[in-house]
Image (cartoon, grey):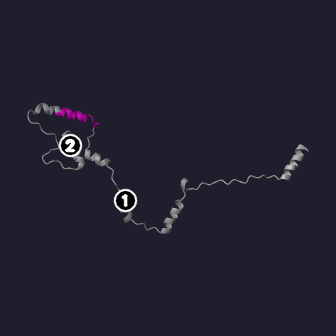
């Protein structure tokens, strides 16, 4: 595990760094020439991979941005502190006006079937039969 990765993990957990630890890369002892050039080359390659003009963000800032916060306590405090001064009759009127607006609140209206009957009487049928068939 690299020191940078360990540092970011500790940063997420909120644990302070050790007093002797520096945020920059540790200096190697010995010949600084080749190693320093190699480190700079790899570091510039890492920075080149990011979008032009963008700076890599802190892991802590990313975590805090994406962290879900519970607003229940704040909302309850607000709701209990700000009591409504509206009269009860007004609130009842609002509730009454808004009730039954949705389709799911409306009762299903059943169509009443009319009694199946005829307009004609038996005498009309006999009269028609005599006129049409001539019997």
Compared across the picture, whether 135 is left or right of 56 comes to right
Indicate the secondary structure of the residue bearing disc 2: helix
Q: Nearer the viewer, residue 4 or 120?
A: 120
28 or 123, which is in the foreground? 123
**Which residues are the magenta region?**
39-52
Q: Quadrant of residue 74?
A: bottom left
Q: What residue would you read off at disc 2?
A: 6
- Residue 122 within the magenta-colored segment of the rendering: no
Residue, x 24% and y 35% (percent of image)? 46
The residue pinned by badge 1 equals 75
Residue 47 position by quadrant: top left
User: Which label's residue is closer to the chain start, 2 or 1?
Assistant: 2
Magenta stretch, main secondary structure, is: helix
User: Of all residues shown, which one is farthest toward the left?
Assistant: 30
SS for dot 1? helix
Is 21 drawn above or below residue 87 in the view shown?
above
Q: Position of residue 56 (x, y in %)?
A: 26, 41
Indicate the position of residue 107 as horizontal and vertical percent values.
58, 56
- Distance between mark 2 and mark 1 Cα atoms: 37 Å
């Amino acid at each position: 595990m690299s020191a940078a990765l360990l540092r970011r993990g500790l940063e997420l957990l909120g644990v302070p760094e050790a007093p002797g630890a520096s945020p920059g890369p540790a200096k190697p002892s010995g010949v600084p020439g080749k190693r320093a050039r190699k480190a700079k080359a790899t570091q510039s390659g890492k920075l080149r991979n990011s979008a032009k003009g963008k700076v890599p963000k802190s892991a802590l800032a990313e975590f805090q941005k994406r962290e879900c916060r519970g607003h229940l306590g704040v909302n309850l405090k607000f709701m209990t502190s700000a009591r409504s001064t509206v009269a009860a009759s007004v609130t009842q009127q609002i509730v009454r006006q808004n009730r039954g607006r949705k389709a799911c609140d409306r009762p299903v209206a059943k169509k009443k079937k009319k009694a199946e009957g005829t307009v004609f009487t038996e005498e009309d049928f006999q009269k028609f039969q005599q006129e049409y068939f001539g019997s």
